[in-house]
Image (tube, rainbow, N blue to C red):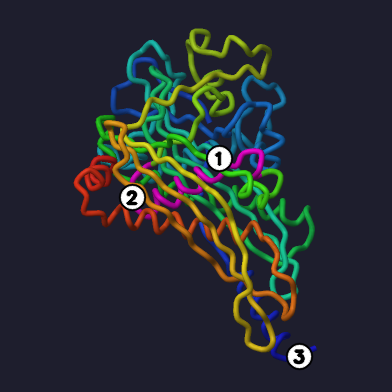
Amino acid sequence: MNLQFLNLKAALRWQLKAFTVFAVISLPQYLVGQESKDIKWGGVWLRGSNADRDKFYPVGSQFALQALRKENSPIAGEYSAKLFKSLEVTATPGGGRILDRVQNIKLAKASSGKALVMACAINYEFFERTKEAGENIVYAEVGFELLVSDFSTRSVVFALPGRLQYKDIWQGEKHIKSEIKKIYEDRLPNSFLELAKRKWDGETSFQTLGFGKVDVWEDAKERMPDGFKERSEFFLSTLLASTFSNAIDIPVMPYSKGKEVIYTGLVVGQLEDKGSVTNKESSGPDKDAFFVLEKPSYTLDLVIPAFREARGGGDGVIDSSLHYAYARVILNGEAGAAIFNKKYDAGVRRVMVKGDKVRPLWLASWDATSKLYKDVAKDIKSSKDDEVSSLVSGCRLR
């Protein structure tokens, strides 16, 4: 085998071992007569209904409390306690940060007025296999949000999304699930703590940014793995929320079609007067509760028409493939009219064996989409338009 190619593979292995990126999660307890600026610790929630937990969160479900289940994993309670402890030891009374307002007292009560609750919500976890430079590679990611919600209105006050990534040589499904577990155990707590250090005055008067219509065309869906096709609008909007929030320093509200159960068991397990708000159409120990999202001040509409591939250049030993993502992003102002409307495309390069066929690669398309969203955030942040500038300043946490 060519010595240059062997050196390339060795370098790739070293880079994969060194690869790291960023994420969140938590449990339930609050107070009836709480002060308006106090936040109760809510624990770890999962995005979706109880019926989704094993299907979409085979690893993460053991770290989140399962509503009213006797066989709850003890890991969930221990993990939530660990997260809260890290907040508690870092907090400074009157410090003005999110974590400085968190308490761990009794159950919240919807009828008590403002009942603020903070939780770590797991949005997704996944892993995908591919080939790079002739090596079998695995890529994994966990997406999350730090949520502050008002239980008196069952609305999200704000969400701070994040991502944690892992990449390595493929060593089997058992190994990658073990590595995903390490993401939750070793990296999520620190990432969540960093999000909780954001400053916030405890008020809810700032403007909000959320999602309107998310339209993923069939051609784009066909390039996705089955798990992504099923929830394509959710995945692509969640990636935007995470990328956008990190790049432009404002929270982005969770995507919702308006009627689905948004977080597993969040009201059932954590609200004293839960009988007044639980979903009457559900029954049994897994009864879910709808969590209403108030209409945001500004909305982002997304149109994702396609993903494409092309052959890139080589150096005589290896070739490269180019992977492109395309989107139209529309920002609607408080009056409902579009104040920003622009088409985008972005591409990433991937190494492949010389002469190999260029194939669709979802992980590359995912990276290209993230790169595209960073361009969107940059354009909105630097816009000279008064209405767009007003969004950037008005939606920041105070």
Q: Residue at x 78, y 53 (%)?
A: 174
- Is 247 covered by the magenta stretch? yes
- Is 84 covered by the magenta stretch? no
Q: Position of residue 99 (x, y in %)?
A: 37, 40
Separation of marks 3 and 2 at Cα, in angstroms: 47 Å
Q: Residue at x 43, y 37 (%)?
A: 211
Q: Give the magenta-colored segment's residue range.
A: 228-251
Q: Disc number at residue 99? A: none
Query: Which element is circle 3 on?
Result: loop
Above or below residue 65? Residue 375 is: below
Residue 66 lies left or right of residue 146; in this view the side is: right
Separation of marks 3 and 1 at Cα, in angstroms: 44 Å
Q: Disc number at residue 249? A: 2
The residue pinned by badge 1 equals 233
Q: Residue at x 66, y 52 (%)?
A: 223
* Amino acid of disc 3: Asn
Of the two numbered discs 2 and 1 on the same chain, state the one appearing first in sequence.
Answer: 1
Of the two numbered discs 3 and 1 on the same chain, state the one appearing first in sequence.
Answer: 3
Q: Residue 338 is drawn in which quadrant?
A: top left
Image depth: mark 2 or mark 1 in front: 1
Q: Position of residue 305 (x, y in %)?
A: 55, 49
Q: Disc number at residue 2? A: 3
Q: Residue 358 is drawn in which quadrant?
A: bottom right
Q: Position of residue 28 (x, y in %)?
A: 51, 26
